[in-house]
């Protein structure tokens, strides 16, 4: 399972972004360390398209999320998005699972760094869920 992550500042939501993050993946089955790379397009009509590549210690191939999201809540130090997309558990499988995702990004007093909480569920797979809690660092930012 994977998630998404965004830039560290709510005022910078109008750019193309790439981040790298590490944290923990929580599911009803297990808790695993996770590393993720997130790449997002600039928003169009406040909707952003993105892909997240996620690795746990179980697999050498990434789990991939391709999705769109929109900011639903903003504050001076955080924002929350809601979106829908597809979960690709095995890229060569070519069988995506529809998902609903929500992300909360909280800024921290370190440059280009944020704490990210990502929740996702698979509505057609018995509502299987996951939560990723991670620290993310912005590696690319282009307006």
Image (cartoon, helix red, strand yellow):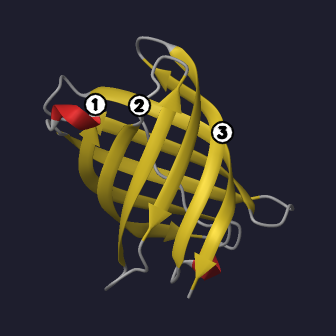
Q: Is residue 92 visible?
A: yes
In percent of width and height, residue 19 lies at 60, 58
Q: Residues within 10 Å of mark 2 (few under 14, many from 20)?
A: some
Q: Nearer the viewer, residue 137 or 119?
A: 137
Mark 1 touches mark 3? (CB < 8 Å): no
- Point out the tag, 2 or 1, that comes first from the N-terminus: 2
Closer to us: 104 or 67: 67
Q: Is residue 122 visible?
A: no
Residue at (39, 80) in percent of width and height: 43
Q: Whole-Å distance between the Cαs marked 1 and 3?
A: 20 Å
SS label for mark 3: strand
Quarter location, residue 29:
top left
Q: Quadrant of the N terminus?
A: top left
Q: Is residue 119 above or below residue 74?
A: above
Q: Earlier in the sequence, mark 2 or mark 3?
A: 3
Residue holding disc 3:
22
Question: Residue at the location (18% across, 39% down)?
Answer: 96
Q: Residues within 10 Å of mark 3 (few under 14, many from 20)?
A: many
Residue farthest to the right, as pictured: 109
Q: Nearer the viewer, mark 2 or mark 3?
A: 2
Q: Is residue 110 left or right of residue 44?
A: right
Q: Secondary structure at mark 2?
A: loop
According to the image, label 2 marks what residue? 61
The image's mark for residue 90 is 1
- SS type, badge 1: loop
């Amino acid at each position: 399972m994977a998630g998404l992550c965004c830039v560290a500042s709510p005022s910078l939501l109008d750019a193309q972004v790439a981040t790298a993050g590490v944290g923990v993946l929580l599911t009803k089955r297990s808790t695993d360390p996770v590393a993720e790379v997130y790449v997002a397009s600039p928003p169009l009509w406040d909707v952003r398209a993105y892909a997240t590549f996620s690795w746990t210690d179980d697999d050498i191939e990434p789990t991939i999320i391709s999705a769109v999201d929109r900011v639903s809540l903003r504050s001076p130090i955080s924002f929350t998005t809601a979106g829908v997309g597809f979960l690709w558990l095995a890229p060569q499988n070519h069988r995506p699972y529809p998902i609903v995702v929500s992300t909360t990004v909280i800024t921290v007093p370190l440059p280009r760094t944020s704490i990210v909480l990502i929740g996702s569920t698979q509505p057609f797979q018995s509502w299987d869920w996951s939560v990723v809690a991670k620290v993310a660092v912005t590696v690319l930012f282009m307006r």
